[in-house]
């Protein structure tokens, strides 16, 4: 299970991590998510929602809190859409999981901003 991300600095460290061990941890983590491991889903929700919220604010500015919370929930639902298509397409050789998730969040935030 990946270490808990509690600060922006920790997120940046995870985003820039290129070590084989980090990529292996990410691969195992995503495999557990795909296996519907409840503990892995709790880790995803508890460890990534704060950093995602900060990333969204940095990307599109501060939305009202309800919109941010709704967008965070939408991002997690996106991971499950189409039989977990986005999770199945994650490639640890290309990016850390946090980077992949941040890209999904950035695109979702920009799409949400365009719709408003």
Image: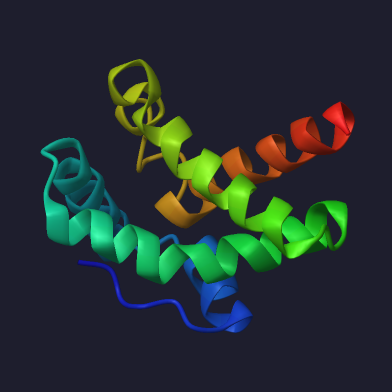
* Quarter occupied by the N terminus: bottom left
Query: Which of the pair 115/95 is nearer the observer?
Result: 115
**Which residue occupies the extreme top position in the image?**
82
Q: Hey, which quadrant is residue 112 in on the image?
A: top right
Query: Which of the pair 18/79 is nearer the observer?
Result: 79
Q: Residue 6's spot in the image, x, y percent?
A: 48, 83
Residue 86 falls left or right of residue 59: left
Q: Hey, which quadrant is residue 81 in on the image?
A: top left
Q: Residue 57's spot in the image, x, y percent?
A: 78, 62
Question: Where is 83 relative to 113, above or below?
Answer: above
- The answer to whether any part of residue 52 appears in the image is yes
Q: Residue at x 35, y 43 (%)?
A: 92
Q: Residue at x 54, y 39 (%)?
A: 74
Q: Residue 23's spot in the image, x, y percent?
A: 31, 54
Q: Residue at x 70, y 35 (%)?
A: 107
Question: Where is 95 relative to 54, above or below?
Answer: above
* Quarter occupied by the C terminus: top right
């Amino acid at each position: 299970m990946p270490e808990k991300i509690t600060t922006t600095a920790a997120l940046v460290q995870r985003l820039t991590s290129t070590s084989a061990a980090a990529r292996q941890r990410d691969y195992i983590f995503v495999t557990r998510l795909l296996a519907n491991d409840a503990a892995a889903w709790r880790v995803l929700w508890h460890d990534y929602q704060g950093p995602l919220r900060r990333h969204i604010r940095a990307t599109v500015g501060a939305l009202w809190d309800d919109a941010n919370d709704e967008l965070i929930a939408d991002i997690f639902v996106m991971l499950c859409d189409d039989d977990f298509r986005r999770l199945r397409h994650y490639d640890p050789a290309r990016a850390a999981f946090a980077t992949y998730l941040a890209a999904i969040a950035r695109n979702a935030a920009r799409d949400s901003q365009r719709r408003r």
